[in-house]
Amino acid sequence: MKRVHAIHSRIREQAVLVGVEIPSADRGIPVEWSVEELAKLARSAGALVVGVFTQHLKRASPSTLIGRGKVEEIREGLLSLKPNLVIFDEDLSPAQQRNLEAAFQVRVIDRSQLILDIFAQRARSNEGKLQVELAQLGYLLPRLTRRWTHLSRLGGGIGTRGPGETQLEVDRRRVRERIGTLRRRLATVERTRALQRGERTAVPYATVALVGYTNSGKSTLMNALTRAGVVVEDKLFATLDPTIRCLKLPDGDQVMVVDTVGFINKIPHALVEAFKSTLEEVRTADLLLHMVDVTSPLYEEQIQVVEGVLREIGAGETPRLMVPNKIDVFEAPVSKITGEGALEVCPISALTGNGIQRLLDVIGTVLDRGKERAHFRFSPSQGHLLSLLRRRGRILTEEYREDGVVVTALVTPKLAGQIRKQLRERDFSESR
Ligand SMILES: Nc1nc2c(ncn2[C@@H]2O[C@H](COP(=O)(O)OP(=O)(O)OP(=O)(O)O)[C@@H](O)[C@H]2O)c(=O)[nH]1
Ligand SMILES: [Mg+2]
């Protein structure tokens, strides 16, 4: 299937934004703030914002979302602003999008399409690209009735990267086929990832995942902790692909740290769906560090958004620490940063390093809490298991006897299980 890629013009796309407040869809985030975030998204996608319109609506119009008077007001405004693109902050139905384009005589996209476009620009890995295309097609499928002919002369740009206009002309069956192919290819990539994860869990390190709203400083902390060299940018969705690094805690324990994609308000469902395998790293983590950008005036709402996505991906019950970040700029009252059922609040500045030592201590303590005191008896030929225990656990007592060593150690249930299994297999093969 042919794909239409945007021709990046040297002239930046000029965008006009439209924000709508609908009481029934109220998420506690005022329209002005939501539109400000939309502007950041638009700039992250490479556009220049040349105008903003907002409307407080009682009821959404099925044909144009906004009211007839507002359509007229914007149409007149566009005559002098002359944008190439109008971006709505709410999802538009295919009919709404079509009617608005007819009225404005310019391309109209919605927030989801903009976010998908940013992901398409950022995707680097094979897996990332497959995931983004899958998400775009998932978004496209219910909108296939749309006709673009009246705008075909307007060419590429934001919202047209990836599966684009030509695909709108093909029937649903072929899009479904493409989705099927992508799913199969992703399944192959995911198997490799699952295998790697399997290898990592076979080495029983605990995994700590950095989660949070986009731009909260996850990659900055990752770099501060592990010198991973992850790209840090004052851009939304700087990170798409997960990075995993080893980290030694002050108590000597080793853990794996995972940095991955950030979340955002009104995140397109198709995207969460397509990024399941990436988010699997978060879902299977032993501990989450929920990072909060306290310099954002809406950090409390952002916490709610992140908690919501965590529940959606099945990580709602995972133990977590709240990590207010950027305290070099602003120290938010800890009482406001609670998170549901978080174990502890550890304010830091990932940039200056302030608070990181305490954070590491707390991570160590919290992970220790899940550990058990286990007893093992190793025969002289099982020295490799004893050294594994020395490396990964903490030996409390060691008693040498004629038939081997009896050890009491503080270990994760994972490690205890693994050693017991190997001891059992050994007993089994000896008894045959
Ligand atoms: N002042 C200050 N800025 C910070 C701090 N931590 C991160 N930043 C800045 O915040 C911006 C975003 O940081 P990133 O580490 O890329 O954020 P992220 O959470 O990985 O973002 P995504 O990958 O886009 O989800 C960058 O401009 C950082 O320099 C901090 O402690 N203090
Ligand atoms: Mg990042």
Image (spheres, rainbow, N blue to C red):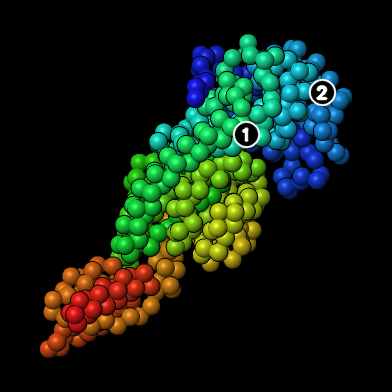
Circles 2, 1 touching at the beta carbon (< 8 Å): no
Q: Quadrant of residue 154?
A: top right
* Image spot of residue 364 (x, y percent): 40, 66
Label 2 packing within 10 angstroms: few (<14), some (14-19), many (20+):
some
Image quarter in which the C terminus is found: bottom left
Residue picked out by circle 2: 71
Count of numbered tags:
2
Kind of residue at disc 1: Leu
Among all residues in the image, which is located at the extreme front? 173
* Image spot of residue 106 (x, y percent): 70, 17
Left or right: residue 341 versus residue 242 is right
Q: Is residue 52 visible?
A: no
Residue plotted at (59% across, 54% down): 312
Q: Is mark 2 within 8 Å of ligand 1?
A: no
Depth order, front residue of 62/287:
62
Q: Secondary structure at mark 1?
A: helix
Q: Quadrant of residue 146?
A: top right
Q: Secondary structure at mark 2?
A: helix
Depth order, front residue of 378/208:
378
Kind of residue at disc 2: Val
The disc, 2 or 1, on the residue closer to the chain's N-terminal end is 2
Depth order, front residue of 107/251:
107
Residue picked out by circle 1: 141
Residue plotted at (57% across, 18% down): 156
